[in-house]
DNA sequence: CGAATGATTGACTGGTCAGTCAAACAACCG
DNA sequence: CGGTTGTTTGACTGACCAGTCAATCATTCG
């Protein structure tokens, strides 16, 4: 069977297209036909790989996270100082640049869809848990190195990630009062309170 | 014209119903017929007061905010210490209790809808600005009273509101790792860093 | 009273779209 | 070659629903 990875390749094509479309017009407006067109295929093919629209979107949400995590692996596993890693992490999260903004849009759609979908809540729980653990690990390192203030690392991780989520939403909404630059400044300020003097 | 406030009363009835339905099943699933049924009237009447579904939802989002603000006026205008007012404000925001959770749901739906609707972005900007100003005012009072650390009150207000938004989302999503109680603890911790020793 | 205006109703229409399906195509194998 | 399995296609269908509309009811006023 030399016809090896048609399925994997096609699925990825479709998932990427689905994320692009969601990001551009939102889940509510998304039609299977839009995804098919964007993926350069037909609605029949989309349904061949994903039984229902719901299946497709769940897979797309999952894929969106995997991609986001992949894009940040370098930062999380770097051997820079904890202080620097935390700064890089925050910077990579700022809604600026097509890939990041697009991923944020998909993420926001996931949240709202998940309000009424237990399976998506499960996905959120898993994924959010990974971020929380990654950030908490950096914080623990920083505390061990005497760079950060004492306190429960998980509490700080939750606070930081929550703040990033909330601020990002405002940036994504095109707020004049909350631009990516201003968001960076707010994060810097908060991190400043948490870092110990060098 | 003794038939005074039929219009105002009926509109309010419909808007309240719309918010309830959005909160329960989400904007995407909401049908005009659902709203009509919840309001105890007919689809014809809903369309009599709101030309399109979009008009209805915009008015409902607006109404949802007005109600939320009204519910918190007491806190914002209280003459308790700034420290207490800030705590009360955070407490009132925790997603617990039907009214608050419902309002949060509607708010989340607004955000995602606004990603692709300039008018709703405008509404968000206006409304978010009011919260920011209210919180910043408390912070300024607290700094004047020597209760809070120095620094730009607007930056702190943004950080706090952003964190509340992000954490609330997780609570709303039924996260096991982020319950209303845990959210309170995270907020307490962050406020603790901001308050000066008594 | 009877006309005018305001409010309410729900049956109906026109358009939309997820999902189906039968037909066709492509790669492989014996 | 001809059969088998995997893949692709897009026309079609059945369900759904926002918005329309003609009819009805209610209230006010001259």
Image (tube, coloured by chain):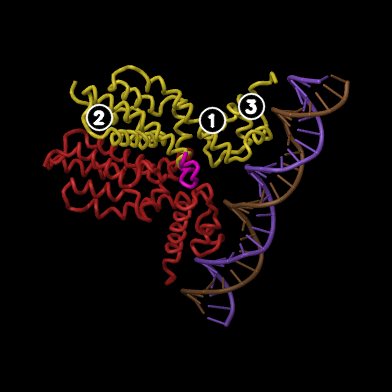
Chain colours: A yellow, B red, C purple, D brown
Q: Residue at x 52, y 64 (%)?
A: B41
Mark 2 chain: A
Report x, y in % for residue B37: 53, 61
Which residue position is annotated with label 1?
A: A20
Q: Mark 2 to mark 1: distance in Å? A: 33 Å
Q: Residue at x 62, y 36 (%)?
A: A50
Tell me which label, 2 or 3, sits earlier in the chain: 3
Per the image, is B2 magenta?
A: no
Tell me which label, 3 or 1, sits earlier in the chain: 3
Q: Which mark is residue B193?
A: none
Mark 1 chain: A
Residue A195 falls in which quadrant of the image?
top left
- Span colored in magenta: A112-122
Which residue position is annotated with label 3?
A: A7
In front of the other: D7 or A185: D7
Report x, y in % for residue C10: 62, 65
Is C10 placed above or below A111 here?
Answer: below
């Amino acid at each position: 069977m030399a016809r090896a990875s048609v399925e994997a390749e096609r699925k990825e094509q479709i998932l990427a297209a689905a994320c692009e479309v969601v990001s551009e017009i939102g889940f509510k407006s998304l039609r299977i036909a839009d995804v098919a067109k964007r993926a350069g295929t037909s609605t029949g093919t989309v349904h061949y790989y994903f039984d229902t629209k719901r299946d497709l979107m769940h897979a797309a949400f999952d894929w969106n996270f995997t991609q986001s995590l992949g894009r940040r692996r370098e930062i999380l596993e770097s051997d820079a100082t904890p202080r620097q890693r935390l700064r890089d992490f925050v910077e990579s999260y700022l809604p600026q640049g097509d890939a990041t903004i697009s991923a944020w849009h998909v993420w926001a759609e996931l949240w709202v869809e998940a309000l009424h979908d237990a399976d998506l809540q499960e996905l959120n729980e898993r994924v959010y848990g990974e971020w929380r653990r990654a950030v908490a690990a950096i914080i623990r390192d920083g505390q061990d190195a005497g760079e950060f203030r004492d306190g429960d690392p998980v509490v700080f991780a939750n606070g930081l990630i929550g703040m990033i989520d909330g601020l990002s939403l405002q940036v994504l909404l095109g707020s004049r009062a909350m631009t990516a630059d201003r968001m960076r400044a707010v994060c810097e300020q908060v991190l400043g309170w948490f870092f110990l003097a060098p």
